[in-house]
Image: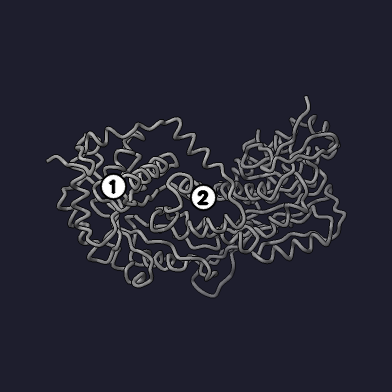
Amino acid sequence: MTVTTPAGLDLRSLLHGLPGVDKVGLESRAAALGTRSVKTTAKAAAIDLAIRMVDLTTLEGADTPGKVQALAAKALRPDPADASCPPVAAVCVYPAMVPPAAEVLAGSGVHLASVATAFPSGQAPLDVKLADTRDAVAAGADEIDMVISRGEFLAGHYDKVFEEIVAVKEACGAAHLKVILETGELGTYDNVRRASWLAMLAGADFIKTSTGKVPLAATLPVTLVMLEAVRDFRAKTGRQVGVKPAGGIRTTKDAVKYLVMIHETAGDDWLDPDWFRFGASSLLNDLLMQRTKLTTGHYAGPDYFTLD
Amino acid sequence: MRKTYKLFIGGAFPRSESGRTYLVDGDNVALASRKDARDAVTAARKAQPKWAAATAYNRGQVLYRVAEMLEARRAEFAAVGVPAAEVDAAVDRWVWYAGWSDKITQVHGSANPVAGPYFNISAPEPTGVVAVVAPASFLGLVSVVAPAIVTGNTVVVLAGAPQAAITLAEVLATSDVPGGVVNLLTGDPAETAPWLASHDDVNGLDLTGVSDTALATELERTAAGSLKRVRRPAGTEIDFFADPGVKAMTAFLEIKTVWHTKGF
C-alpha cells in the first residue's frame, strides 16, 4: 500500500525531498548554543522548568514494585525538604510496572508513561506490539513511548514503519504517543530528519531521541535536528509536536543547554512540559543539588539526596 | 623561561576557570575561585572510592614513590626557596607516613570482648573527601597532605606557599598517585575556604594552615552545618620538624564496628 501524505506526495518522495542536513554547520551551531551563560534568577527559573520537564525513568530488569513506587513518590515531591520544588512531568516505566506506579500517581497531575512495542529493540510482530500497547493503557498509562522498527526504516520500508505508528496510535486511544527514533542507530542526521517527519506524519504527539539502551543516546545536534523538524512541521501543517531527548543527559549544565536550544530554534511555545521532556533518571538529582545551591547559598552533596 | 604556576585538579594542571592570576615573588600564579574549589571536590569525590579500595600495601608503595620523586627534584624545591633541610625532612615524612599505610588498622583497630558467641571487630576507614588549608611552610604542607591520603582519603588543598605546592603537584603527577587523590589550589584561602567548609560533599576539614583565629572559628562553625570532621591543632606556632604522632591520620578516620557469628 502506498501512503499518501497531506502534501499529496508519496512518503518516499516527501522524506527524500527534505533538505539535507549540513553536518558541520549543525554541530557547530549546537556547540555555539551550548556556550550561553545562564545565571542567578534565570538559572533558578531554568532549573525549575527543567525539573517540571523531567520524565523520571527507570527501565531496568531489576525494577520492583517497591522501587517504582519510591520513584513515583519522588516524582511528586522531588525535594522533600522544600515544598516550593515543583513535581516532575511524568514517571516512565515498563508496562508491568504501570499498576504499582499508578497507585501512587493517581490524581496527582504527574503523568504515567510506559514504554511499549517490544522496547527497546522493537523487533517483534505487530500484533504483539499492539497488545503490549493496549495492556499498558488499560493498566493506567496515559503516555506511551513506542520504538520504531529501525530495521524496517533503514531498509527503506517507510510505509511499513508509518503504518505501524498509525496502528499503535490507534491502540493508544486517548493516551499520548511518543515515538522513539533511536537516533544512535539511524546513522546520519538526514535519517534523523526523515524519521522525525515520518513519525509526525503518522500522528506522533512527541518524537523522542533514544531508548537509553544503546551507547549513543541524546546529543545536542540530534535534538537540534528534531527541534527544527517540529518547528517546520508546525509551520506546514499547523500541528504542534513535542520533543523528548532521552539518555545521557545527566547534569544541570546539559539541561540548560537544551533549554537555550529550544528557545533559539523551535521557540518559546516548546518551553513547556507539554511540549518538551527530558528522559532521565540521574539528571533530577543534579537539578535538585543545583537548586539547593541556589536556595541555601552553599554547594550541595549527593549524600543528601535519594539513591534511585 | 618564565613559568606560570597553575592549579592541580584531577591530575591535570588547569588555569583558574576565572582566568585570574596574582604575583608571588615575581611569579605568575593562578588565583583559584570557588568554582575551581567545586571542581576540585568533584575530582576528589570521583577518585575517592578507588583510592580507598586500593590495598594498604599499594597505597604505601605509591606514597613511597612520591618520596623518591621528591628526592629527585630536590633542586627544583631549592629554586623556589625551600631550604634543603626542609626538603630532607619532607622526604622522611612521606616515607614515615607511607609505612603507616598497613599499620594504622592494626594499631587503631581492635577485637572487642563481648558476652556472646560473636566476634566484635572495630576497624578504621577513611572519612572521604577532606578539605585542607595548608600551612605556608613546605614541610607543613607535606605534614597535612600525606597523613590524610595514606588512609584512603582524597584531599582538596588550599596551598600556603604556591610555588612549592605546585612543584609538589609536579612530583605527585609524575609518581603513581591517581588523578584526583590530591588536588592543589593556590590563591586566597579566606576566599575559597568558606566554600569548602560549607560544601555538603566534603567530609572533613583541616584548619592547620589558618592563622587567623576568627576565620578558623568561623570555618569550624560553618563546617558543623554538614557535620564535618574538623582538625584544628592547638596553638599557632607548630614545629613541623617535631615527631608528628598519629593524630593527623586519626583525625580523618571513621571507626566501623562489625559483629560476626563465631562458627556455624
The structure residue drawn at horizontal position 70% and vertical position 35%, both measured from the top left corner, is: B171
**Chain at tag 1:** A
- The single residue placed furthest to the left in the displayed view is A1
Q: Seen in the image, is B9 located left or right of residue A209?
A: right
Q: Is residue A249 left or right of residue A200?
A: right
Mark 2 Cα shell of 10 Å, populated few (<14), some (14-19), many (≥20):
many
Q: Secondary structure at mark 1?
A: helix
Residue at 37% over, 57% down:
A58
Mark pair 1, 2: CA separation: 26 Å
Q: Quadrant of residue B196?
A: bottom right
Of residue B217 and residue A2, the one placed in the foreground of this image is A2
Please name the amino acid that badge 1 sits on.
Met
Quarter of the image holding residue A209?
Answer: top left
Question: Considering only vertical position in the picture, is A117 above or below A134?
Answer: above
At label 2, the amino acid type is: Val
Q: On screen, B115 above or below A10?
A: below
Parent chain of label 2 = A
Tell me if A78 is positioned left or right of A178 in this view: right
Crowding at dot 1, Cα within 10 Å, few <14 / some 14-19 / many 20+, comes out as: many
Where does the C terminus of chain A fall, quadrant-wise? bottom left
Ranked by sequence position, the earlier of labels 1 and 2 is 1
Q: Nearer the viewer, residue A66 or A217?
A: A217
Indicate which disc residue A200 carries.
1
- Residue A10, x across and y down, in percent: 19, 37
The picture places residue A233, in percent across and down from the top left corner, at 33, 45
Q: Viewer-nearest of labels 1 and 2? A: 1
What secondary structure is found at the residue carrying circle 2? helix
Query: Quarter holding the N terminus of chain A?
Result: top left
Residue occupied by mark 2:
A256
